[in-house]
Image (cartoon, helix red, strand yellow):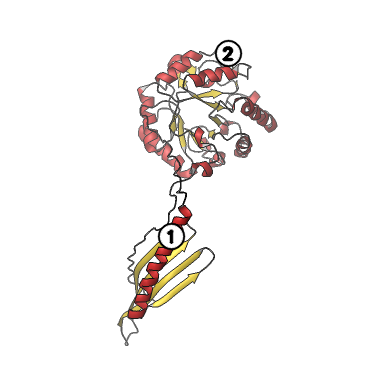
Amino acid sequence: MKKYITTLVVSMLMMLGVSNTYADFSSDRSYNPANSLHSSRASFLMKDNGWMTLNYLHPNANKGGYIAGAKNNGDTHMYIYSRNGGDNAGGYDLSTISPQADWEAQIQRLINSGLKPVMWLTPDDSPQITNQSIAAQKAHFDEMVRRFDKQVDAYVVCLECDEYWSAAKVNELVRHLKTKTDKPVAVHMTSGVGGHKGNLAYYKGADYVFLQTGWNKSSAEIKAMVKDAMAKTGLPVVLSEYAQESRSASARAMGDAGCAAGAVGTGNGRSITFCGQEPRPIEEPKDDKNTETAVAVIGIALIAFGAYYLHTNYDFELRMDFTDNYQMYGTRKTFNLLESETNNNSLDFVMDYTYTTTDDFYQNRIFFGFTGTFD
C-alpha cells in the first residue's frame, strides 16, 4: 500500500483564451433586461397616512398622495394591485379593486411621474378571488398582460402565495405568465425564506424572490435572511416587506441593511441609492473566434518548442491526447530521487509541462507542476 506523505503541486495557470466572464443577461435571463428590477426602490406601505400603494388603481385612492409620498422617499417603482377582494393590510384604506376602463390612463399618470409600475396579480385575504379555478387565474393574468404589458415593468404572481395556494399551483401560474410576457416575474410569500413553512419550491421558475421578513427585525436579522434567501434559491432578492411605515428612519435603515447583504431592491424604503445595480452585458470582440485561434496556435507552438527541447536534452516523455472537445499537448518526466533496496521505499517526483484546450470556461491553459509521492 502506498503511503502518501507529501504532495507538492506548484502550478501556473495562464488563461490564454478570450472568454466572457460575466453572465450574458440578454440570453441567460428569461426576461428582458431592460425591465430588470435590480436597484428598484418602492415604499408600498405608508401607515402614517393609512396608505398602501397596492391600492393605487382603486377609484377612490389618493393617487396624488401615493405618488408624492413615493417620490419624496426616493422611489423608482410603485407596487400596484390588479385586483383586491379584502386585503387592507390591517387598517390601510381601500380593499376592493377590479379592473376599470380608465386604468391605462391611471398607470400612465404613474409612469409620467417617473415611477415604474410593478403589478401584483393576486391579493391575500380575498377567498372569492384565490378560490377561483386555475383557469380563471390564468384568464385574469392573460387579460392584465394584454392590456398593460407595454406599461408594466414587472409582475408579482401573488402576495403571500403560501397562504392559499400550493407550490405546484404557483409554479404553474409562473410558467403560464412567462409564456405571455418577457417582463420579470416574482413570487412573494409569508415571512421567512420559503414563507412560514420554509418551502423553497414556491420560487421555482421565478426571476426574483420578493422577500418578506416580518416586522421589527434588526439589521443583523435582515442581513441574515437576505443572505439565506440568496444562498438557498440562487435568485436575486428584492427585500420587499419589512416595515409598515416606509418613510421612517428605521425602515430606511432596514432597507440599507438588506442592500448591504446583497438584496437588489427594496419595497419599504431605504436611504442609499446603490442597491444591486445590474452590470450590463460585456460584448465579446467581433474577432473573438479569430483571437482564440491565434492564441491557441501560439500556445501550441510555445509548448511544442519547450517539449521538444526537454525531450531532446533531458529525456522527457512527449504526451498528446485528443477527444472531440479536449486536446492536450506536452511533456512529462518522472524523477526517482530516493530508493531503498532494504525496505522497498522510494521518493519519486513527476514534472508536467502541458498545454490544454477545452470547451469549458477556461478555454486555454498552460500547466507546469510537480507532484511527489513516497512508497
Q: Which residue is mark 1?
A: 294
Q: Is residue 300 above or below residue 333?
A: above
Determine the secondary structure under disc 2. loop
Q: Say left or right for 63 vs 147.
A: left
Residue 76, horizontal then vertical, whole percent: 45, 25
Number of residue marks: 2
Q: Residues within 10 Å of mark 1 (few under 14, many from 20)?
A: few
Residue 17, horizontal then vertical, whole percent: 42, 57
Residue at (44, 16) in percent of width and height? 68
Asked where in the image residue 167 lies, by quadrant, the reply is top right
Extreme-bottom residue of the structure: 341
Q: Residues within 10 Å of mark 2 (few under 14, many from 20)?
A: some
The quarter in which the N terminus is drawn is bottom left
Mark nearer the N terminus (1 vs 2)? 2
Q: Say left or right for 96 vs 346.
A: right
Determine the secondary structure under disc 1. helix
Q: Amino acid at mark 1?
A: Ala
